[in-house]
Image: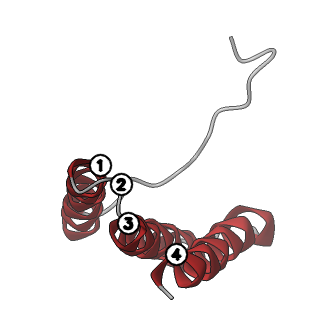
Amino acid sequence: MGLFFKDAKRKKSSKPITVIRILLLISVFTLFIIGFRNDFDLYYLGIAFVLVGLVNIITGAESHYHQEKKKVYIPDYLLGVMFFIMALTYIS
């Protein structure tokens, strides 16, 4: 398998970061369900986008902490900013 695929040397996330990610993703799914039950209220969708942006920022910060290349953590930061901008359009 090493012929076609390069072995990724990604370091394992620390336990608190993993717990924070899981809690944020559970809250995102909960907000989607609440928003769907309340006649698809876009306010809940905006809050969910803020949380998804926060997850991407945390992933980028962790990649930056592990001193990975810029092409790894810059897209995570940009995705986080994009989700924050999308959240502003839904919340306001």
The residue that label 3 is drawn on is 48
In the picture, measured across the screen, residue 21 lies left or right of residue 30, that is: right
The answer for how far apart the CA atoms under marks 2 and 1 are is 4 Å
Identify the residue at image location x=74%, y=23%.
Answer: 5
The answer for how far apart the CA atoms under marks 3 and 1 are is 12 Å
Q: Amino acid at mark 3?
A: Ala
On the image, the x and y values in percent for residue 37 come to 21, 49
The answer for how far apart the CA atoms under marks 3 and 2 are is 13 Å
On the image, the x and y values in percent for residue 17 come to 28, 68
Q: Residue furthest front?
A: 39
In the picture, measured across the screen, residue 34 lies left or right of residue 84, that is: left
Query: What mark, if any, has residue 36 been given in the picture?
Result: 1
Q: Amino acid at mark 1?
A: Phe
Q: Secondary structure at mark 1?
A: helix
Q: Amino acid at mark 4?
A: Tyr
Task: Name the N-terminal-most of marks 3 and 1.
Answer: 1
Is mark 2 in CB contact (under 8 Å) with mark 4?
no
Identify the residue at image location x=38%, y=66%.
Answer: 48
The residue that label 2 is drawn on is 40
Q: Is residue 42 visible?
A: yes
Task: Name the N-terminal-most of marks 2 and 4.
Answer: 2
Is mark 2 in CB contact (under 8 Å) with mark 1?
yes
Quadrant of the rendered image containing residue 24: bottom left
The answer for how far apart the CA atoms under marks 4 and 1 are is 15 Å
The residue that label 4 is drawn on is 90
Q: Residue furthest bottom?
A: 92
Identify the residue at image location x=36%, y=54%.
Answer: 40
